[in-house]
Image: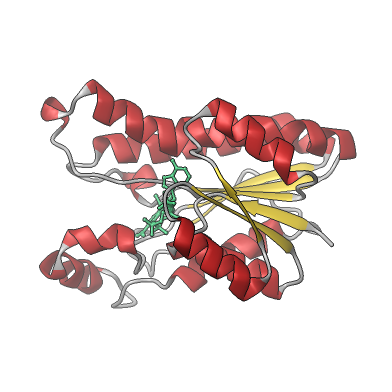
Amino acid sequence: MKRVLITGASRGIGAACARVFAKSGYGVIINYNYSEEEALRLAEEIGAETIRADVSDSAQVADMFKAAGEVDVLVNNAGISGFYMLDAMSDDEWNRMIGVNLSGMFYCTRAVLPQMLRRKSGAIVNVSSMWGICGASCEAAYSASKAGVIGLTKALAKEVGPSGIRVNCVAPGAIDTEMNKKLGEEAIKELCEETPLGRLGRPEEVAAAILFLADDEGFITGQVLSPNGGLII
Ligand code: NAP
């Protein structure tokens, strides 16, 4: 049985990934940081394992991969967002955003690569954002972290492709998860009006794109797939 480790899988897009990979026959490892109850409930629902680790802490990440054993697919999904005027942003706020969204991906990827390189197979799917492609006002740190994810994906795809490892990326549009609850009703309405498909995306729709990119028969690597309802084309 193939095994997938999904970071930030206690809710939202990560939880939808856990469900869809489990349905496709994968052994699923759910990573979470704070949301233990949700993670354990989901693990029971789909028969998965759970490992707590803050992805921005390289020591915790190293321990997580020791505990995880064989991992065929890594989904780097854990992320945080936040609205800041850049001139008012503190060092801590900046470092936390980059630490979780970008360094976290580096720590997890570095930890899983040795076993994938040894086996000469594996797939990594990173979760960026459409804001990493086109930038969002008052989200410079978030946009920078997600643009970094795209650069990481493309460079690593070149580096490890010769070893049979594929690295791809999704850059979702506005998706109906807790992350967007803080936007407020009016902003959500505007986003829906600006989106050609006229609605928010569902976490399951992003999870389907991630599963597609993880398919080990694939010839796709270094690519960015953006399920965004046509909001950016
Ligand atoms: P969400 O509902 O807020 O879920 C975020 C998940 O990440 C939670 O499971 C959370 O678990 C986990 N997490 C946060 N910090 C962590 C850390 N330091 N270590 C381990 N896990 C951590 O958000 P979502 O919308 O599903 O977002 C998932 C990913 O999609 C993020 O990378 C986000 O940037 C990206 N994305 C989302 C949207 C959108 O519109 N929703 C659009 C584009 C991209 P704990 O509560 O346990 O910490």
For the residue pair 193 and 15, the one nearer the viewer reads as 15
Residue 148 in sight from this viewpoint:
no
Is 72 positioned to the left or the right of 141 in the image? right
Q: Quadrant of residue 12?
A: bottom left
Q: In which quarter of the image is residue 201?
A: bottom left
For the residue pair 153 and 11, the one nearer the viewer reads as 11
Is 65 positioned to the left or the right of 135 in the image? right
Locate residue 106, reporting x and y percent: 56, 31
Locate residue 55, reporting x and y percent: 51, 37
**Which quadrant is the C terminus positioned in?**
bottom left
Residue at 57% in and 64% down: 17
Residue at 71% in and 41% down: 67
Residue at 46% in and 62% down: 37
Locate residue 16, reporting x and y percent: 52, 68
Is 16 positioned to the left or the right of 115 in the image? left
Locate residue 65, reporting x and y percent: 69, 38
